[in-house]
Image: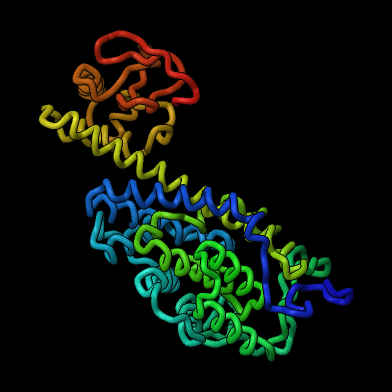
Amino acid sequence: MTQDATYIWQQVGWPALRYDPVAVGAALANARRAQGMVEGKLAALGFEQRLELAAEAWSQEAVATAAIEGERLDLAAVRSSVARRLGVGNQGGANAPRDVEGLLDIMDDAVTRCADEVTHERLHGWQAALFPTGYSGMSKIHVGGYREDAEPMQIVSGPMGRERVHYEAPPSVQVPDEMGRLLQWFNAGTEPDALVRAALTHLWFETVHPFEDGNGRVGRVWVDLALARDSGEASRQIRTSQRLLDRRNEYYEHLEQAQHGGLDVTEWVTWFVQQVRVSCEEASRTIDDTLAKARFWMDHNGKDLTERQRKAVNVLLDAGPNGFEGGMSTKKYESVTGTSRATASRELIELQALGLLTQVGAGRSTRYYVNLPGWGPDGPVKTAGGTTAKRSRDEG
C-alpha cells in the first residue's frame, strides 16, 4: 500500500484487485456444496412449487435490499406485484409504488437477461428505474447517468457538524473511465469462478460509487446477475440481500475495510463467499420445509377435513417448524378460521385424532403443533395415539 493512499482506488496498480485462491478455497468449496444442495432439492419440487418459492424469495429480497438503505417497503404490495409477474398466488393485492416497481423491474432484468452484456446504458437504466420522479426523497438527483457533481462523493454518518467520513469515492470526472474498466473486466469473464466474480464486482462497483444515489441497490442487483449466470433461475432462491441485511454492520465494516486497504482483497472475498454459503443453506432449509409440507398432504390425502381445518393446518405449515410461536390454541384457531370457541375446540381435537396435529399440555394450556418430526416444541409431545415422545432442542 502506498504511503499517501487513503483509499484502494488511489493505490498504484488499481483496479487490479487480487486474492489468494488457497485462502478462499475452503469457503468457496463450502459455498459450492451448499449451492449444489439447493439446485438438487429444487429438482424434487414441481413447477408450481418452485414458482411459489421464487416469488416469496424475490419479494423478501426486494424488501431486504431496500431496508439495507433504510427504506421500508410494504411487503404485501411487493408480494402482489411479484405474484402478477410470475403468475402465482394472490395477484389481486394493492399495486406497489412506481419506485418499487422499478426495483422489481431491474431485479427481474438481472435474472432473465443474465447472459446479456452489462453496459453503461443498462446500468443507467437500472439506476433510473429506482428514481422515476428524478428525486431521492426531497432532493432532485441526476438519474440515468453517472454522477457529474464536482463535490466529493462521500459516505458519511453522524449528526450535522460532527459527521464522520467513512469513505470518499473517485472524483466524478474519473467515473466513466473507472466504469469502463469494470465493465470490460466483467464482460470478458476472466475471473473463472462466479462467486468470486460477484464479490469482486460488488466491491469494485461500490468503490467507484458511480451514481448520485442508488449505488447499493444497483450493486446488489449486479450480484444477482452474476449468480444467475452461474445457476439460472435457481439463483432466485438465494437471498443474498437478506443475509447482508441480517449482517448489515459486518457488511459495511468489511466494505469499508477493503476500500481502505491494499489491492489484495482476500478477506473481503472470503467473507462475501461465506455469506453466499449461508444464503444457500437458508434456501435449502426453506425447500426442505416445502418438501415436508408436500409429503404431509400426500400422507393425509383423502382425510375428510373442513375448509377451516385445512386452512388452520396450512397456516401452521406455512409458518415453518418454528414460525408459529406458541402453537395453535383454541383462541388462535377461532381467529384464523372465524369460527366459534366450541367448534374450534372440536375441530382441533379431530385434527389431533386424525394424526395431523400433536397436542401439548392440557386445559387452558393446550397447544397443537403439526405432526412432523422437528415441528413441535421442546419437551413431551402427545401423539395421535396418546403416547408421549421427548423431542430434543436440536430437533425442535
Which residue is the extreme one toward the top? 387
Of residues 242 and 97, the one nearer the viewer is 242
At x 10%, y 30%, the residue is: 302
Residue 71 lies, in percent from the top left, at: 54, 63
Position of the N terminus, as image quadrant, is bottom right
Residue 295 lies, in percent from the top left, at: 24, 35
Q: As drawn, is 296 to the left or to the right of 112? A: left
Q: As drawn, is 203 to the left or to the right of 39? A: right
Position of the C terminus, as image quadrant, is top left
Q: Is residue 226 visible?
A: yes
At x 54%, y 75%, the residue is: 190
Question: What colouring does the structure picture have?
Answer: rainbow
Of residues 174 and 25, the one nearer the viewer is 25
Residue 342 lies, in percent from the top left, at: 23, 20
Q: Name the quadrant containing residue 200.
A: bottom right
Of residues 23 and 368, the one nearer the viewer is 23
